Amino acid sequence: MFILDQEKKPEHFSILATLKSQEMISKEQFQEEIDLIIKNAIREDVGDGDHSSLACIPPNAHGKAKLLVKDEGVIAGIEFAKQVFNFVDSDISVETLINEGASVKYGDIAFYVRGRSQSILKAERLVLNAMQRMSAIATKTRSFVKLLEGTDTKILDTRKTTPGLRALEKWAVKIGGGENHRFALYDMIMLKDNHIDFAGGISRAISKTERYLKETGRELKIIVEARNLEEVSEILKSNGVYRILLDNFNYEDTRTAVKMIGDQCLTESSGNINEKTIRKYADCGVDYISSGALTHSVYNMDLSLKAV
């Protein structure tokens, strides 16, 4: 039987709560993405069989293993690991010792897994690969969240994710305490510099977008990127914009833009965002700061699955 934790987790660590911050993608769509990741990863790794295990381990042999932490940071991916084990063998059980999103140190044991030895070995690499990366993302996100403490600014991820692993990486951002930006191209309109230039300018891009949404019956929020204060002023002539993205603005212009925008729409800073600059941009009064570094610039947490 597939065993879930008995202890109640903080709400934002679940897939359902992750989706609460998504604008359009449903819980079912998100779970479909997770299912596809698991199915494709097992196909890629196992193929027609784990012949190493098949060759030397009896099919009915049972074993136990522990998820050993060999690093420091925020643990993430425990719930995903359970889904992997369940996909491989529904008779596997998982006993969780550390909650998803908890701070961990070298020597901690996150969970024990029990079941057929062949099944545990078949799932091992996918569990480790995913949890190592998810934990790294959650750890980096948590560090950014701490830098924003005392402000009203929230940290957002981006679409700068590993192809095929976006759902996992955005899940990890939530576990680390961050917020999810749009999931993909289909759940939000985001008019960036190239859209604006190809469309013939900001006003044209926005009016064409509003017409498109009306004609297609879609209800998608519109974010528009501004490269300077003049573009901010032009965007503000339209009433249908949900958020203005202030791209590569300096601190002074960011503060000016926030005052210009007021309560007309939300604000987001992006570009040159790192540990040294994030607090300064937050102090300018923006609602959100987006950073691709949360997902594209991390070092995997060292984890091992050891037989016991």
Image (tube, rainbow, N blue to C red):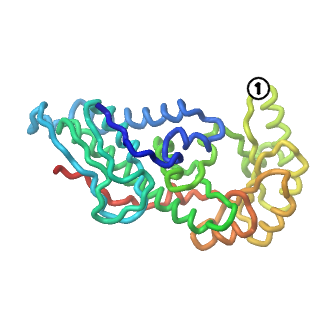
Give the quarter of the image for residue 261.
Answer: bottom right
Give how far across and how far down residue 97 sits, in percent. Answer: 32, 51
Give the quarter of the image for residue 127.
Answer: top left
**Residue closer to the observer: 106 or 193:** 106
203 left or right of 18 in image: right
**Residue holding disc 1:** 217
**Residue closer to the observer: 261 or 249:** 261
Q: Residue at the spot x=46%, y=47% of the render? A: 9
198 left or right of 70 in image: right
Give how far across and how far down residue 128 sits, in percent. Answer: 32, 49
272 lies above or below 174? below
Local crowd size for mark 1, using a 10 Å CA cut-off: few (<14), some (14–19), many (≥20): few
Q: Residue at the spot x=77%, y=59% of the render? A: 227
Q: Residue furthest right?
A: 237
Q: Residue at the spot x=16%, y=41% of the render? A: 63
Tell me the element at label 1: loop
Q: Residue furthest top?
A: 216
The N terminus lies in quadrant:
top left
Q: Residue at the spot x=72%, y=60% of the render? A: 247
56 left or right of 85 in image: left
Three-letter amino acid code of the residue under disc 1: Gly
Give how far across and how far down residue 72 sits, in percent. Answer: 37, 65
13 lies above or below 211? below
The total number of labels drawn is 1
